[in-house]
Image (spheres, rainbow, N blue to C red):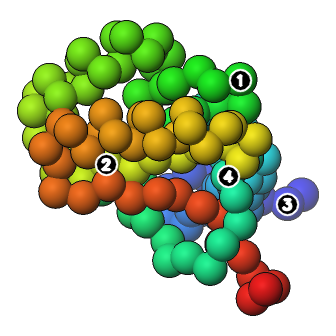
Amino acid sequence: MPRRRNRAELGYSAEINVTSLVDVVLTLLVIFMITAPMMQGGVEVKVPRARTESVPSADGLVVSIDRGGQIYVGTARVEWAQFSAMFPQLVKEKGASNVYLRADEGVPYGNVVRVLGAMKAADVASVGLIAEDDQSGS
């Protein structure tokens, strides 16, 4: 008859079962890879293509104009009258020295210039125009 071992004879195993840990990590990685593009918020704007350098997104305040001509500060929609009145105060509150303008390529040039003029009147150090990098080089 085989002899049964008691707990004292077997000892403790201090090894970690990494198989289940790897499974959990890989599952989370796949989830984050799928959801990350959906989590990028902001206003839907198709910016024009041009040879450009990348702009750090957290570097300043971003103003967007969508295809319908609606103005957004960050992701908050504002009317033109509100924008021209509140933008200088907002720049002072946020302490933003740099502001960036993202305008849809279908927005009339006059609307872009009007918003750009209001941004420049707010006494910011620089106003940048955001465009999509043109990889073709044309």
Instruction: Name the residue at the right extreme.
Output: 1
| CA distance separating discs 3 and 2 | 80 Å
Along the polypeptide, which appears first: circle 4 or circle 1? 4
Residue bearing mark 1:
68
For the residues bearing labels 4 and 2, Cβ distance under 8 angstroms: no
**Lower sequence index among marks 4 and 2:** 4
Say few, some or many: other residues with alpha carbon within 10 Å of mark 3 (under 14 / 14 to 19 / 20 or more): few
Res. 13 visible in picture? no
Q: Secondary structure at mark 1?
A: loop
What whole-number distance in Å separates the C-alpha atoms at marks 3 and 4? 78 Å
Question: Who's the residue at 75% across and 41% down the image?
Answer: 106
Query: Which residue is depicted at the point 51% across and 24% down?
Result: 71
Residue 34, x across and y down, in percent: 78, 47
- Please name the residue that numbered disc 3 is placed on: 2
Q: Residue furthest bottom?
A: 137
When the figure is inspected, residue 66 is found, relative to residue 13, above or below; the finding is above
Query: Residue 33 versus residue 42: which sits nearer the camera?
Result: 42
Which residue has dot 4 on it? Answer: 47
Instruction: Note whether 89 is above or below 37 in the view shown.
Output: above
Disc marking residue 99: 2
What kind of residue is marked 2? Val
Image height check: is 73 above or below 116? Answer: above
- The quadrant in which the N terminus is found is bottom right
The part of the image, by quadrant, that contains residue 107 is: top right
Q: Position of residue 65 (x, y in %)?
A: 57, 33
Residue 45 % position (x, y): 68, 40
**Could you tell me the amino acid type at mark 3?**
Pro
**Separation of marks 1 and 2 at Cα, in angstroms:** 22 Å
